[in-house]
């Protein structure tokens, strides 16, 4: 059962990701990215991390994808399917990515840890994540809020139309 | 039986698709989309290693939350820069951004 779910999500994830970097229309590319991100959320649920999955759906699908679609619509008449979308390094880039993929998969196969089965104990629950976040990782947590504030202010300043 | 290697292999495939996108996209928005794919691949790795190698701790999941936060900030600033450049040069194609190229 778990195998079936895993392979379904895995095949979907790879297909959606490939489509999102190869389709002609940028808007379609954003839609395929949405499906990719939802599949990644599915992987998190499968890994026993429902909180991360929910955050993934909220932040990525709810927030970042809306931004992407806004950006695509604000830069209108560029999303035309007839415009060339790839640089001249299309085939060298594809070959490089494929060679790296083959190499990394060989490395993963050769390592002992890759055959490690799922441990019988349950993964961390929400309470543990919250405790870690507000005790050991308090400083990075606060820095993230500072970073988000800086991004917010920076985006307003850069995006403001100068009169 | 799904082992740790399955999840790491899945995230490797996702990373390489993102790398392919970064190397070949001409449109700046699709370039950012490829970067999101790479960040998601890293996140899958973090959560998978957390679940398989240290199931008692929550560190991998906490770090993956930070990655999601940084990715959100990065894409906000990246997209607003693209929109700002579009206003000035009427283009989102990376080979048109040659103002600093001599």
Image (tube, coloured by chain):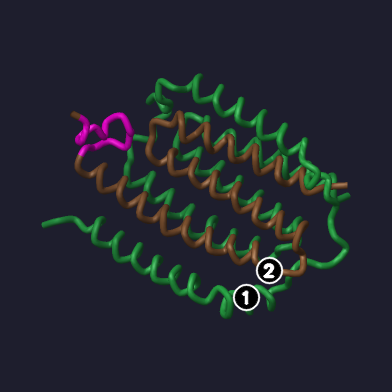
Q: Which residue is mark 2?
A: B58
User: In the rendered structure, which segment of residues is drawn in magenta?
Assistant: B89-101
Callouts 1 and 2 close, C-beta under 8 Å: yes
Element assignment for label 2: loop
What chain is the brown one?
Answer: B
Which residue is drawn at the image coordinates 65% and 40% (left, top)?
A: B12
- Give x and y (percent) for residue A36: 61, 45
- Give x and y (percent) for residue B29: 40, 41
Chain letter of disc 1 in the image: A
What chain is the green one?
Answer: A
Taking depth in this image into account, of A39 and B14 the one nearest to the observer is B14
Query: As displayed, is residue B14 above or below residue A98?
Result: below
Magenta residue check for B93: yes
Image quadrant holding the C terminus of chain A, namely bottom left
Q: Which mark is residue A132?
A: 1
* Relative side of A47 to B25, left or right: right
């Amino acid at each position: 059962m778990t195998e079936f779910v895993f392979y379904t999500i895995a095949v979907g994830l790879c297909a959606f990701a490939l489509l999102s970097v190869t389709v002609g229309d940028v808007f379609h590319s954003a839609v395929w990215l949405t499906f990719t991100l939802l599949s990644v959320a599915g992987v998190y649920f499968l890994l026993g991390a429902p909180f991360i999955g929910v955050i993934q759906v909220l932040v990525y699908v709810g927030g970042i994808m809306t931004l992407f679609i806004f950006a695509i619509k604000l830069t209108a008449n560029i999303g035309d399917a007839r415009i060339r979308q790839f640089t001249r390094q299309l085939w060298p880039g594809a070959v490089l990515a494929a060679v790296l993929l083959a190499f990394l998969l060989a490395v993963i196969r050769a390592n002992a840890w890759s055959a490690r089965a799922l441990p019988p104990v349950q993964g961390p629950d929400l309470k543990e994540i919250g405790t870690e976040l507000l005790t050991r990782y308090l400083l990075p947590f606060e820095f993230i809020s500072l970073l988000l504030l800086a991004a917010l202010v920076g985006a307003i300043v850069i995006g403001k139309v100068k009169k | 039986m799904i082992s740790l290697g399955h999840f790491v292999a899945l995230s490797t495939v996702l990373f390489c698709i993102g790398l392919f996108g970064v190397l070949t996209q001409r449109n700046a928005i699709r370039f950012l989309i490829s970067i999101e794919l790479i960040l998601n691949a890293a996140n899958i790795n973090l959560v998978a290693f957390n679940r398989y190698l240290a199931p008692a701790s929550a560190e991998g999941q906490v770090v993956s939350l930070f990655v999601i936060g940084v990715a959100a900030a990065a894409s906000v600033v990246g997209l607003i820069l693209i929109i700002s450049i579009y206003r000035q040069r009427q283009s989102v194609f990376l080979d048109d951004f040659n103002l600093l190229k001599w």
